[in-house]
Image (cartoon, grey):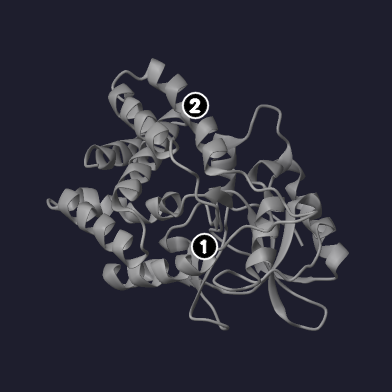
Amino acid sequence: MAFEPPQRLVRATGETAPPGDDWLAELPRAAERAVARRGLTVERVQVPGGRSSLVLLVRRADGTPAVLKLAPPRARPESERAALAHWGGLGAVQLLESGPEDTAEGALLLERLHPEMSVRSLPEAKALLEAAGTLRRLWVPPPTGEGAHRFETVAERTGRQAEAMAASARMDTAAAPLVDAALAVRDELLAGPPEDRLLHGTFRQSKVLGADRLPWLAVGPDPVVGDCAFDLARLVRDRVEDLIATPSGAAVTRRRIQRLAESLEVDQERLRGWTLFRAVESGVRARRVGREQDAELLLEFATWL
């Protein structure tokens, strides 16, 4: 079977891959090896799929449906494997392989969920409620002890992002005031003692899919350790295009911050601050790779914070 990557993945990889990266070119052969190594039968490639990985719908030797996910090293599949193993299926998709050696070629074998059904398909209030409830289950202490995977911290991840934002702001004077505000709020948020929780890292409504074991399970983590407000911040701006199109979008955003902070017992000002930082970072990054419409939406949203 030809493992042709979906166009969504091809476009996104073109935006993010470093010069000389051959992961996409090697992907069909890597998929063949991963399938053969596990004795899987492939049903089809999931389309449109994700922006950072190839997802194959497969069956194991005993006929059990599963998903085989292949991601490039820059997507940190070994961290995703370690986080999923630590969560053990509580709130997140179940990992069907046991050891780090099973992450060869960036491949992960996962339980099959229902990709056509995410909480984003629900009315907004219900979607936020279900997503927040799922996220709460993931906020656990990270693994410790000999041999435990070391996850990136919020300070480390946002440090890299802050450097890229500052460099972009020097060439984009229009975004510079927002970048300055985002960098300042980051410094304030990191000044206190760090919270030590394992976070999903890229949580939003579309990352919560319908399941059989539980009504909803999270997928696609890019795990990080730190402040729970950082994790919740991406959820605040879900459906940003709808928020921008609404005359009361700024007021709706403020109410959303208050409601999410109260329901998950997160400090409201910390949530506002991380929402600002993450919106500006995403907006500046979108502009850097030529997604101007996304950049305008995100930076306008950031002005409300």
| Residue pictured at 32% horizontal, 59% vertical | 261
What residue would you read off at disc 1? 139
> Which secondary structure lies at badge 1?
loop
- The image position of residue 260, as x and y in percent, is 31, 61
Q: Quadrant of the C terminus?
A: top left
Residue 128 appears left or right of 77: left
Q: Is residue 268 visible?
A: yes
Which of the 4 image quadrants contains residue 87? bottom right
Left or right: 114, with 254 as reference point = right
Q: Nearer the viewer, residue 281 or 182?
A: 182
Is residue 257 positioned above or below 181 on the image?
Answer: below
Binning the other alpha carbons within 10 Å of mark 2 as few (below 14), some (14 to 19) or many (20 upward) gives: some
Mark 2 or 1, nearer chain start = 1
* Amino acid bearing label 1: Trp
Indicate which label's residue lies in the foreground, 2 or 1.
1
Q: CA distance from mark 2 to mark 1?
A: 28 Å
**Residue 145 located left or right of residue 19:** right
> Could you tell me residue 90's position as x and y percent?
58, 73
Residue underneath mark 2? 164
Q: Nearer the viewer, residue 148 or 22?
A: 148
Q: Residues within 10 Å of mark 1 (few under 14, many from 20)?
A: many
Q: Is residue 291 visible?
A: no
Residue 138 rendering spot, x and y as whole percentages:
53, 65
